[in-house]
Image (cartoon, rainbow, N blue to C red):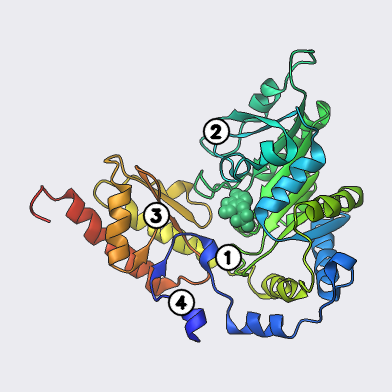
Amino acid sequence: MTPAERGSGDADFRSDTVTRPCAAMRAAMAAAVVGDDVLGDDPTVLRLQERVAAQCGMEAALFVPSGTMGNQVAVKLHTQPGEELICEERSHVWVNEAGGLGLISGVQTKTLAAPSGCPEPAAIEAAIRDEDVHHPRTALVVIENTHNYAGGRVVPLPRLAAIRAVARRRGLKLHLDGARLWNAVVATKTPIARFAAEVDTLTFCFSKGLGCPVGSMLVGSRRDIERARRIRKALGGGMRQVGILAAAAEFALDHLVERLADDHARARRLATAFAALPGCRVDPATVETNIVFVERPAADAGELERRLAAAGVRAIALAADRLRFVTHRDVGDGEVARAIEAMEMATRALAAPAGRD
Ligand SMILES: Cc1ncc(COP(=O)(O)O)c(C=O)c1O
């Protein structure tokens, strides 16, 4: 392993975005045949886009720099300023995209609470505005699969199909934020095309569990993707010799999809171990993919994060009472064992009566 691949040496569970490209991925990037993709002639990007569209059973795909840009372009495609979209209240597109919905598309948002991360179809239908001069027009539903802040929960295909039926009946578009859709594909052994068949557009990321340094895909109809190309340009997302990044994405699709199952097994191992620790609330049964949330009713997640970091184990306190661990390609069985040991030490110390630490 080179120093660049090895990184800091910490067992880093903060996110699946922290992976570093391995030597074989770097070799594929170095060997990429490239052109100017804004002029439409980077052969590696064109090949990747065609491959992904075919894999999804959709007409076209567009390589974008990030999941955020893919989502924001999709919202812009499907809405007009002053309209409304419906999503779950912890959705990335609403919480974590820097206000892009208002900034870029001028839309407002109706959020729904759903512990699993995916609202009931009936709740979505009830949230659609009546045809009334006082109301915004509801234009779009955004579903996140897997759902990050719900702990990597999968939105099962029948639920997505039922939401699609509501959207069709009521004249709404449906966008799938599938930043981690490949995790759902592997966890449920469902081909990606079956998820794609239920939506108008979807995004997925290469830069998370698939281990690439950069890159996401927006997939949809030919007409939508042609328009999306112009919106991407307006947002500054037109990239030139970007076949270098597309080559990493091709490498990931060839070699790194099936291994997501290892991440899921390791996440379950973490969850099972953490559930037995003092002051930790974890339900291993809800760990379906690569994300584990540890609830700390004592609201000491920040202190726990600091103690773990001092022991060389990185996790993220996303709230005072929630610590997140994400498994990925750069954490193996050894890192999982280190995380469990560090959590045992830190949670015991925090549970000890004051002064005994
Ligand atoms: C569910 C979800 N959607 C979208 C994104 C955005 O991806 P990016 O960081 O590439 O903009 C993320 C990133 O973590 C995510 O978790």
Instruction: Determine whether, in the image, residue 233 is placed left or right of residue 4.
Output: right
- Residue type at mark 2: give it: Ala
- Dividing the picture into quadrants, the one containing residue 57 is bottom right
- In the rendered view, tell whether residue 19 sits above or below residue 325: below
Is residue 276 in sight in this rendering? no
Q: How crowded is mark 4: few (under 14 residues within 10 Å), some or many (20 or more)?
A: some
Q: The residue tagged with tag 3: helix, strand or loop?
A: helix
- Residue type at mark 1: give it: Leu
At horizontal 58% and vertical 65% (from top left) the residue drawn is 260
Q: Residues within 10 Å of mark 3 (few under 14, many from 20)?
A: many
Residue 260 has which mark?
1
Badge 3 or badge 1: first in the primary sequence: 1
**Decide: marks 4, 1 in contact (CB < 8 A)?**
no
Residue 348 spot, x, y in % from top left = 19, 55
| Residue at the extreme right | 223
Q: The residue tagged with tag 4: helix, strand or loop?
A: loop
Q: What residue does disc 4 label?
A: 7
Is residue 311 in sight in this rendering? yes
Q: What residue does disc 2 label?
A: 114
Instruction: Determine whether, in the image, residue 310 is placed left or right of residue 237.
Output: left
Residue 148 spot, x, y in % from top left = 54, 48
Badge 3 or badge 2: first in the primary sequence: 2
Distance between the alpha carbons at the discs numbered 4 and 1: 21 Å
